[in-house]
Amino acid sequence: MQQKCAAISPSEPTGQQAQRAIKVHGVAEVGFYHDERTRLKHLYQTDPLRVLFPQVAGDELPTAVISSTSGGLVGGDQLGMRFTLADNAKALGTMQAAEKVYRSSGPDSCIEVELTAADNCWLEWLPQETILFEGARLKRRTRVNLEKSSNLLAGEMLVLGRLAGGEKFSQGMLRDAWEVRVDNRLIWADALKLDSDIARMIDRPAGFHGQRACATAIYVGSDAAQQLDGARELLAPTAEVRCGVTCLGEILICRWLAHDPLKLRQSYGHFWASFRHQVAGLPAQLPRLWQI
């Protein structure tokens, strides 16, 4: 395991030793290229991240599954995930399970995601939900850089507390940021920040309105505006799940809010499977791991 730790002198008290717990810095880099079909070009991984390549049906995209052997993030842990597609490649990246972020005594957990696609590519980034335990501190940034001829479907889901156990995320910190560039030109930047009195911020009618699960999905492509009406038809707002979609130039932005994470996951998954089929003719289904 690749670890970072500070030297501790024998004279340091036990309390200081406990504060200098070993942290992890996991990296997973995956690159694909196209030669008659999409093939693996580059793979680099360090603990606690591992990349798996399950067999998929012939009409499905090559899939890279990132697995974390640590069981979750504690304060100070860092994860870096990078997906790169060369010309004409098509691939999907996902996570093996939900990411859990545990209570922190002070340091932030950090996740960096980089998604890059060259000419005429289709890239999907479909991680499972991130669950923030009470007292968790997370900084996550997702950076996208595409060539104009490529398309991206990417998203994230957040669950604010272990709701099945009655726990709510009311203390801690969350900063979840996106940066999307096409031909190195910034077309969209977005950041969600929850800090200090989180419970009050979540309960505000103009904010989360008391909902404890949220999700964002974006579609980037030169045809984004043409896909807006179709995306709206696929969304099904209910009393349990609030959702909507808008278009800003070359990007569609879809949002979900719900109190029940399972209801949100079902709505999110239905939209994703249907939208990829509608836009790219891909199978109207999610990766097998999502169906467990």
Image (cartoon, rainbow, N blue to C red):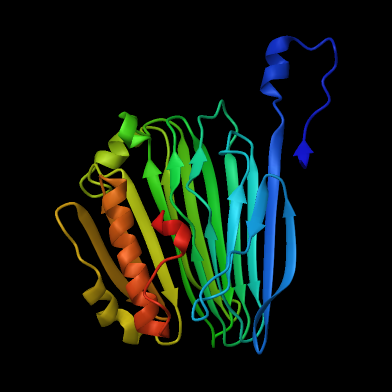
Q: Position of residue 160 (x, y in %)?
A: 37, 40
Quarter assignment of residue 284: bottom left
- Say if residue 224 shows up in the picture: no
In this rendering, the answer to whether 249 lies above or below 165 is below
Q: Return the residue nearer the eye: 55 or 52.
A: 55
Describe residue 181's horizontal placement relative to residue 246 as left or right: right
Pick the residue in front: 215 or 60.
60
Q: Is residue 107 above or below residue 218?
A: above
* Spot occupied by residue 278 in the image (x, y as percentages of width and height): 34, 82
Residue at 58% of width from left, 40% of height from top?
109
Q: Quadrant of the N terminus?
A: top right
Considering every residue shown, the one lying at the far left of the view is 239
- Describe residue 127's horizontal placement relative to residue 258 as left or right: right
Q: Would you place residue 278 above or below residue 169 in this image? A: below
Query: Viewed as shown, does residue 160 lie left or right of 138?
Result: left
Q: How many marks?
A: 0
What residue is at 68 percent from the left and 13 percent from the top?
15
Look at 51% across and 33% down and name the residue there.
102
20 lies above or below 59: above
Give residue 119's position: percent from left, percent from top: 61, 86
- Residue 220, horizontal then vertical, whole percent: 45, 77
Q: Residue at x 58, y 59 (%)?
A: 65
Q: Is residue 288 visible?
A: yes
In the rendered structure, the answer to whether residue 55 lies left or right of residue 165 reads right
